[in-house]
Image (tube, helix red, strand yellow):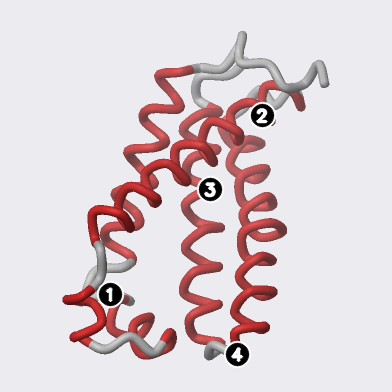
Amino acid sequence: MEWLSFADVPWLGVVLAFIATFIIGSVWYSPPVFFRHWQRAVGFTDDDMKDANMPLAFGQMVVGNLAGVIMLAVLLVALGVDSWWAAALTGAVLGFAFRWGAHLIHDGFAMRGQAATWIDGVHDTVALAVAGAIIGLFLG
């Protein structure tokens, strides 16, 4: 697995991409944007949200997002992507195929409404496209 190398990863790009995806998620899932729609789509009440272990949820989100952005950078380097545009397109394709695909599988099996799948899938595709573009600025 020679491709799995961290040697040429642009770490400043990774940090900036992580921050950007965090900001995108914070806006995307805010009450004025998609939070209330998402909440209804997954069947969470306000009481459910009050009882949720938010530090655990936030910690899992940080770890998962950071791992995803780092692996996106590793893949971009391994594929020889050398422009922000190609990196953005690669991020979007990966977001659509793997992240949105996973939502289709999991939400379908859990019989969640299509709204949750679309909200999460579009978010992930956009966030990985933006992350790719930012990382791509540091490649080539």
Inter-mark Cα distance, 3 to 1: 19 Å
Report the mark closest to the observer, 4 or 2. 4
Tag 4 near tag 3, CB within 8 Å: no
Residue at 49% x, 69% y: name it.
Answer: 120
Rendering coords of residue 75 (x, y %)? 69, 30
Q: Which residue is mark 4?
A: 111
**How far apart are labels 2 and 1 at the CA level?**
31 Å
Amino acid marked by disc 3 = Leu
* Mark pair 3, 2: CA separation: 12 Å
Q: Is residue 90 above or below residue 26?
A: above
Amino acid type at circle 4 is Met
* N-terminal-most mark, 4 or 2: 2
* Residue on which disc 1 sits: 33
Image point (33%, 58%), residue name: 57
Under mark 1, the amino acid is Val
Q: Earlier in the sequence, mark 3 or mark 2?
A: 2
- Name the residue carrying label 3: 128
Tags 3 and 2 in contact by the CB under 8 Å rule? no
Q: Nearer the viewer, mark 1 or mark 4?
A: 4
Q: Which residue is mark 2?
A: 76
